[in-house]
Image (tube, rainbow, N blue to C red):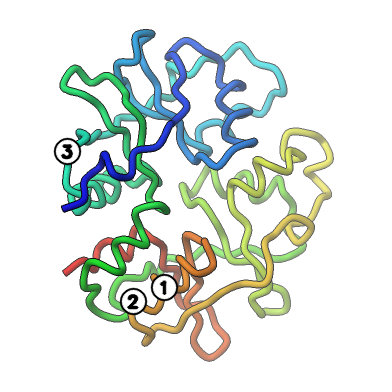
């Protein structure tokens, strides 16, 4: 039986008193969506994610990570992979820290690395309609980056479908915003979403199987899919939703 140690990866860690701007730099330039925070001796305190660093708009700031630390439940190296997936789902993160019995950080397990194993080794039940979220907030292609920044901060959502003349034309995520950088300047007031959105969009239908949706996510290396019926967006399904369908 595979366990956390089989998927263990190096993971950047930051000390609680380091600046949020340092976390923002790492999250912008790399593949991570969250960073683990330690006490100075690699003992796990929690994590900080992209949504947190987007709250600090200044290019340079003395604001430290300490005020943004979120709790996270870690796993041990010998935790079975199924329980690793459950921990990721409960944490609502894209990774889980792996610690020893003293809570010293050894690394992390990425959801996108263990996700392909999930769909080949475990039976997924139901259809997309059974697990999708129908609480969908979309935006228009001509909305500004300032508007999207406010949506991310206020709603807690991490990505939004983009429409133009009621037609789905793209997706915009907090990572797109972070990597572009113009949300921090006066330019954001006039820069439209369509200039940085991801396109074309991979979609699924409500009556597609969860296995089909999961396979699309792996094949296209994406974490969420808009659910479309009769050319209308009816929901969103992401990797965490798929985890709910474990047999």
> N-terminal of the two: label 2 or label 3?
3
Q: CA distance from mark 2 to mark 3?
A: 27 Å
Q: Position of residue 97 (x, y in %)?
A: 32, 33
> N-terminal of the two: label 1 or label 3?
3
Between circles 1 and 3, the one closer to the viewer is 3
85 with respect to 22 (left or right) = left
Give me the residue at 40% from left, 52% from top. 113
Q: Is residue 55 above or below residue 84?
A: above
The residue that mark 3 highlights is 78
Between circles 2 and 3, the one closer to the viewer is 3
Q: Which of the 4 image quadrants contains residue 73? A: top left
Neighbours of disc 2 within 10 Å: few (<14), some (14-19), many (20+): some
Q: Position of residue 103 (x, y in %)?
A: 23, 21
Q: Which of the 4 image quadrants contains residue 215? A: bottom left
Q: Position of residue 123 (x, y in %)?
A: 21, 73
Are discs 2 and 1 less than 8 Å apart at CB?
yes
Neighbours of disc 1 within 10 Å: few (<14), some (14-19), many (20+): some
Q: Is residue 48 above or below residue 4?
A: above
Q: Position of residue 225 (x, y in %)?
A: 49, 69
Give me the residue at 28% from left, 32% from top. 98
Neighbours of disc 3 within 10 Å: few (<14), some (14-19), many (20+): some
Q: Is residue 103 above or below residue 204?
A: above
Which element type, helix, strand or loop, lies under badge 3?
A: loop
The residue that mark 2 highlights is 211
Q: Residue 215 shows which numbered tag?
A: 1
- Give 89 or 96, whichever is nearer the viewer: 96
């Amino acid at each position: 039986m595979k366990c956390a140690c089989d998927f263990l990866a190096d993971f950047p860690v930051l000390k609680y008193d380091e600046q949020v701007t340092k976390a923002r730099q790492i999250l912008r330039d790399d593949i991570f969506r969250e960073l683990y925070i330690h006490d100075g001796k690699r003992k796990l305190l929690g994590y900080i994610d992209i949504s947190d660093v987007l709250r600090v708009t200044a290019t340079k700031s003395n604001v430290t990570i300490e005020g943004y630390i979120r709790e996270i439940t870690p796993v041990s190296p010998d935790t079975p992979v199924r329980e690793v997936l459950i921990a990721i789902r409960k944490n609502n993160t894209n990774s889980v820290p792996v610690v020893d019995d003293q809570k010293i950080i050894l690394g992390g397990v990425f959801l996108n690395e263990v996700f392909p194993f999930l769909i080949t080794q475990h039976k997924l039940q139901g259809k997309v309609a059974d697990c999708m979220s129908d609480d969908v907030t979309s935006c228009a292609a001509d909305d500004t980056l300032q508007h999207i920044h406010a949506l991310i901060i206020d709603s807690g959502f991490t990505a939004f479908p983009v429409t133009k003349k009621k037609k789905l034309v793209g997706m915009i995520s907090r990572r797109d915003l972070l990597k572009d950088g113009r949300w921090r300047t006066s330019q954001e007031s006039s820069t439209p979403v369509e200039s940085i959105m991801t396109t074309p969009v991979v979609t699924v239908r409500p009556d597609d199987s969860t296995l089909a949706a999961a396979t699309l996510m792996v094949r296209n290396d994406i974490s969420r899919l808009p659910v479309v019926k009769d050319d209308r967006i009816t929901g969103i399904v992401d990797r965490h939703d798929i985890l709910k369908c474990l047999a």
